[in-house]
Amino acid sequence: MKKKKKRLRRIILSIIILIITVCGVLAAPIIKRGYVMYEEAVAAKSVDEAIAEMRDKDDYIKYEDISPTYINIMLKSEDRRFYYHYGFDPIATVRAMCNNIIAGRYVQGGSTLTQQLAKNMYFSFEKRMERKIAELFVVVQLENKLTKKEIIELYCNMAYFGQGCYGIEEASEHYYGISASTLNKEQSEALAWTLKSPENYNPNVYSK
């Protein structure tokens, strides 16, 4: 009986090693193309330059001037584990993959706030594995260079809120005629939900 169990364990271990090896071989070209995409992006504009360019915007708003209510609601909606990961959240990624498999279509993404920031800074929204790999290389730089508050600040200033609005300050003024510093709970919830699909869920669509 013991010999059979040992043999079964060896077989299972061999299968796992084989699967990992095959996945590694299949993933290698994608990783290489993703790295090339990343190199081309940062060669055209470094991460430091991209950050400085964003901070030079006329309507750029600092973290401490954004409504804490909005920040809390946005994090719960977009990246609940933001303070517990290093830019990539394997738990959220696996959960999203399972939900997509169950649904039989793409219904949920597993991107962290840092990944979304990297995508907004450099890449298109096309769903390609190479782009996701390229994002991760930018994510490493962002997590090394910035504090968590700075990442939230940049994301809030770069996120798209529909109807031509980029950044929480511009969106707050456009939809409510107020600064992002004074957003209340209801307004914060509406703008956080807008991030899911800016042209379909923005406050002006709700009001129709």
Image: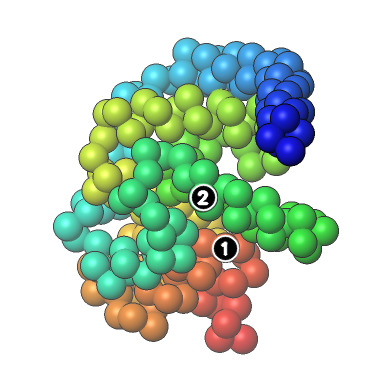
Numbered disc 1: secondary structure: loop
Nearest to the eye among marks 2 and 1: give it: 2
Task: Count the marks.
Answer: 2
Which quadrant of the figure contains the N terminus? top right
Nearest the camera: 162 or 75?
Answer: 75
Which quadrant of the figure contains the C terminus? bottom right
Residue under the image location 53 percent in, 31 percent down? 135
Nearest the camera: 28 or 76?
Answer: 28
| 66 is higher (above) or lower (below) than 55 | below
Where's residue 198, x and y in %?
A: 57, 63
Q: Label 2: few (<14), some or many (≥20) within 10 Å? A: few
Q: Which mark is residue 91?
A: 2
- Disc 2 residue type (three-letter): Ile
Circle 1 is placed at which residue position? 196
Single out the residue that lies furthest toward the left. 64
Residue under the image location 17 percent in, 57 percent down? 64
